[in-house]
Image: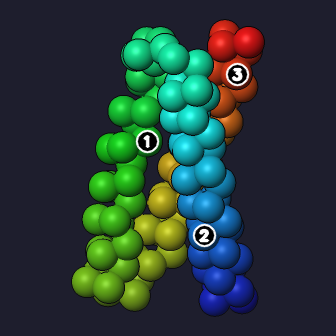
Amino acid sequence: MEQIFLTVLTIIFIVESFFEIRYFAQIRNVFVNSGRVTPTKRVQRIIKIENMWSWISWIFLFLLFILPDVYTMLVICVITLIETWVVYELYNARDYVQKINK
């Protein structure tokens, strides 16, 4: 049962990673196409969080190979939870950026 749960969380993490990249690219394209030089403070904060999370997620993934198997469940739960939050923030930022640049 634990293995199924870990597999489902891993699949969720991979799908969310795809959406994270997609939303980030959409935010970047809106600013490039609008001619605005710098994003708003709110969007800058989200971009900074996303960049930090990109590096931190790689560290967590690396830890999966180093740590004993007892910590696998904890690490996967943590990275999936944080990835969900980051994707949610990027989704909101994308909608906000589209509204302010219309």
Q: Secondary structure at mark 3?
A: helix
Residue at (57, 35) in percent of width and height:
29
Q: Amino acid at mark 2?
A: Ile
Q: CA distance from mark 2 to mark 3?
A: 26 Å
Horizontal side of 92 relative to 28 (left or right) equals right
Can you say whether 13 is above or below 94 in the image?
below
Would residue 29 be found to the left or right of residue 60 on screen? right
Q: Secondary structure at mark 1?
A: helix
Label ID, residue 98:
3
The disc placed on residue 38 is none
Q: Residue at x 44, y 79 (%)?
A: 72
Dot 2 surroundings within 10 Å: few (below 14), some, or many (20 or more)?
some
- Which label number is shown at residue 14? 2
Disc 2 and disc 1: Cα gap in Å? 16 Å
Q: Which residue is mark 1?
A: 50
Distance from label 3 to label 1 (Cα)?
18 Å
Q: In this picture, is 67 found above or below 56?
A: below
